[in-house]
Image (spheres, rainbow, N blue to C red):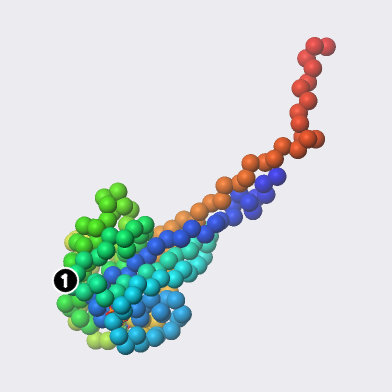
Amino acid sequence: MATEQDLTSTKPSVHRVILLGDSGVGKTSMFYRIKDGIFRDAGVSTTQIAEFDKHFRNTQGEVTIQFVDTCGFETYHSSIPPSLLRNVHVVLFIYALDDSSSFLHLQHWYEETFEVVPEFLANKIIKFMVGNKSDLPRRVKKDQVTDNCSNRYGVIEENIFEVSAKEGTNIDELCNKISECFAPQKRTPKPKPKLPNETRVPTCRCS
Ligand SMILES: Nc1nc2c(ncn2[C@@H]2O[C@H](COP(=O)(O)OP(=O)(O)OP(=O)(O)O)[C@@H](O)[C@H]2O)c(=O)[nH]1
Ligand SMILES: [Mg+2]
């Protein structure tokens, strides 16, 4: 018999989260902060896409999130290869709080993303706006972020974050919020095998 645990237990399903933004905003630093909980100064621009899976327990159960760091091709003038955005569930649009131009360039990343992904997927993508380097003096004003994010990019207020990959500020909060976007996949209980002694004997209605 399927136990209550069988019915409610969850099988982790992988949700793809991609980090996009100008070179130097700290995508790789965020990636390693999330992955290993440390600040690893990459020193050089990323040249290869990297990804890792991490399990989170949200209020409904366990979810697995795959984080994807993006690299060199994504300089301001190049395009995002469509294959990169295949099966993407969440896009983190990242800018640096001490660099206004990286914030303005979000428009480029936003337009590129929605040009590349097919329409049916575009409606399903969950968007986050993430200002990194909150440990540095800010050059991007808070009102500017809120206005642009909600009016121009349609990002809901609770998906707007300011973090510091260097100090770890707000990184867990961001990850928890991302994990809350996903419901764990419920495992369908296997059909119950029919045992011989459970075979029903038809009741005789003749007598
Ligand atoms: N102060 C501060 N510096 C940071 C932070 N995050 C990253 N940096 C620095 O910013 C620089 C660029 O960081 P990366 O993580 O390499 O940036 P990136 O977006 O991956 O850049 P590309 O790989 O070229 O696309 C490095 O010198 C980092 O040490 C942060 O939160 N605070
Ligand atoms: Mg990088």
Q: Specify whether 195 is left or right of 140.
A: right
Name the residue located 42 percent from the left edge and 76 percent from the top edge: 34
Q: Find residue 116 and report its horizontal and vertical position in percent.
A: 24, 58
In the image, 17 versus 161, the foreground residue is: 17
In the picture of the structure, the residue carrying the numbered disc 1 is 77
The location of residue 205, given as percent across then percent down, is 78, 14
Q: Residue at x 31, y 60 (%)?
A: 83
Looking at the picture, how far across and down is residue 141, in whole percent?
19, 76
Give the answer, above or below, for where 6 lies relative to 31. above
Q: Is residue 21 left or right of residue 88?
A: left
Q: Nearer the viewer, residue 122 or 8?
A: 122
Is residue 154 visible in the rendered image? The answer is: no
Q: Residues within 10 Å of mark 1 (few under 14, many from 20)?
A: few
Element class at badge 1? loop
Quadrant of the snapshot with the N terminus: top right
x and y, in percent, of residue 101 in the image: 16, 77
Ligand 1 sits in quadrant: bottom left
Residue 169 falls left or right of residue 62: left
